[in-house]
Image (tube, helix red, strand yellow):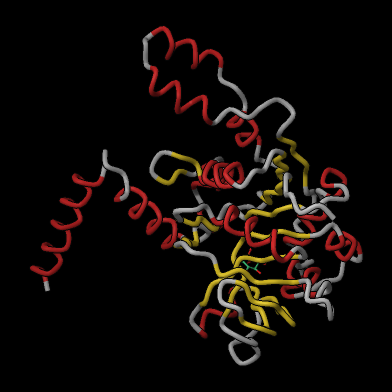
């Protein structure tokens, strides 16, 4: 099996109900952190890791996503005519090469495992990555790139992981650690959304995966797991054998849960503070706010 990873799957079929009413007409993945849609962060990370084929698993109401990745010739012409070269550059960076991007519909909301399985024919018989755009990771070396590098050593299946507080385990897939080698851990079990008591560790799966096509075969069985859904975690867990072929990877970076409002706001503030064009004004504002709230105490 080759250890190059050229294909990534982006499950974006969710309804985004936590962001209603915004998501009544705007797909959650188009919502912006500072000035870039969530999905652009995911694409940029995938590109940095050497991904060349991008598969989006979408659903009804997500056509704005397809438009977003299309070229915008009128807009380009108008920016060109006005000599706005910087903006033109920003715009062009979002263009996807013809044929590099594919959309497939998940017609029933049966879970993350099912969403990935919907892409099986496009993935074929190659290792592939999965990126959940809700998990935004700020890192010097983009998270998937770190994983692709580690995967050169391990092969097999790899999931991004990070430590979470015990009372938050039930929101994640949790790994059972066989051997802890620092940034790489070998995994002897995985449980999707366990109760705090049942969690085998506090090492949670975060939305970046490098998987073998065998996981797609496991998904074929359509077994229901936590929440009555077809879980990706369960199909990966099925790959745990004596040959140690499931690994957790502790990435370096800060993860924001942009599927929650609090996480989305934290990411917005943090990303804005890292931007030289925005940081000074925002810092002043945050300072004023904190003075005002202290004064009111
Ligand atoms: C999904 C996965 C879960 C993982 C989480 C990370 O859950 O099923 O294993 O820990 O993403 O964000 P979701 O958040 O979609 O419920």
Q: Choose between 124 and 272: the one closer to the eye.
A: 124
Say if residue 40 shows up in the picture. yes
Q: Is residue 73 left or right of residue 14?
A: left
Q: Position of residue 282 (x, y in %)?
A: 22, 48
Which residue, as the protein is rendered here, is positioned at the far bottom?
197
Q: Position of residue 212 (x, y in %)?
A: 81, 59
Residue 73, quarter of picture: top right
Say if residue 24 shows up in the picture. no
Q: Quadrant of the C terminus?
A: bottom left
Q: Quadrant of ligand 1?
A: bottom right
The residue shown at (65%, 71%) is 248
Q: Position of residue 206 (x, y in %)?
A: 59, 66
Q: Position of residue 81 (x, y in %)?
A: 41, 7
Q: Is residue 10 above or below residue 291?
A: above
Residue 171, quarter of picture: bottom right
Q: Is residue 283 left or right of residue 228?
A: left
Residue 148, quarter of picture: bottom right
Q: Is residue 221 left or right of residue 111?
A: right
The residue shown at (45%, 24%) is 89
Tally of numbered tags: 0
The residue shown at (81%, 69%) is 235
Q: Is residue 143 above or below residue 169?
A: above
Q: Choose between 23 and 280: the one closer to the eye.
A: 280
Q: Quadrant of the N terminus?
A: bottom right
Q: Is residue 124 above or below residue 90?
A: below
Which residue, as the protein is rendered here, is positioned at the far top?
81
Q: Choose between 52 and 123: the one closer to the eye.
A: 52
């Amino acid at each position: 099996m080759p250890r190059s990873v050229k294909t990534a799957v982006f499950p974006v079929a969710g309804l985004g109900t936590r962001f209603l009413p915004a998501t009544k007409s705007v797909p959650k993945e188009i919502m912006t952190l500072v000035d870039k849609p969530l999905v652009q962060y995911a694409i940029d990370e995938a590109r940095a890791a050497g991904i060349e084929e991008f598969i989006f698993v979408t659903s009804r109401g997500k056509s704005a996503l397809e438009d977003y990745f299309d070229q915008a010739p009128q807009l380009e012409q108008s920016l060109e005519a006005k000599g706005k070269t910087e903006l033109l550059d920003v715009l062009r960076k979002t263009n996807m090469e013809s044929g590099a991007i594919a959309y497939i519909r998940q017609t029933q909301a049966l879970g993350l495992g099912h969403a990935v399985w919907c892409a099986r024919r496009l993935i074929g018989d190659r290792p592939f990555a999965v990126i959940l755009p809700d998990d935004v990771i700020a890192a010097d070396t983009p998270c998937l790139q770190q994983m692709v590098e580690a995967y050169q050593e391990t092969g097999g299946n790899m999931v991004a992981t990070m430590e979470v507080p015990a009372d938050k385990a039930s929101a994640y897939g949790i790994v059972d650690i066989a051997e802890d080698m620092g940034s790489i851990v070998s995994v002897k079990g995985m449980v999707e959304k366990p109760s705090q008591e049942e969690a085998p560790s506090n090492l949670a799966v975060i939305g970046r995966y490098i998987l073998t096509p065998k996981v797609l075969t496991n998904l074929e069985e359509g077994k229901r797991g936590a929440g009555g859904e077809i879980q990706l975690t369960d199909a990966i867990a099925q790959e745990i054998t004596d040959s140690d072929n499931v690994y957790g990877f502790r990435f370096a970076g800060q993860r924001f849960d942009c599927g929650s409002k609090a996480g989305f706001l934290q990411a917005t503030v943090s990303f804005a503070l890292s931007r030289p064009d925005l940081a000074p004004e925002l810092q002043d504002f945050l300072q004023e706010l904190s003075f005002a709230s202290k004064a009111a105490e």
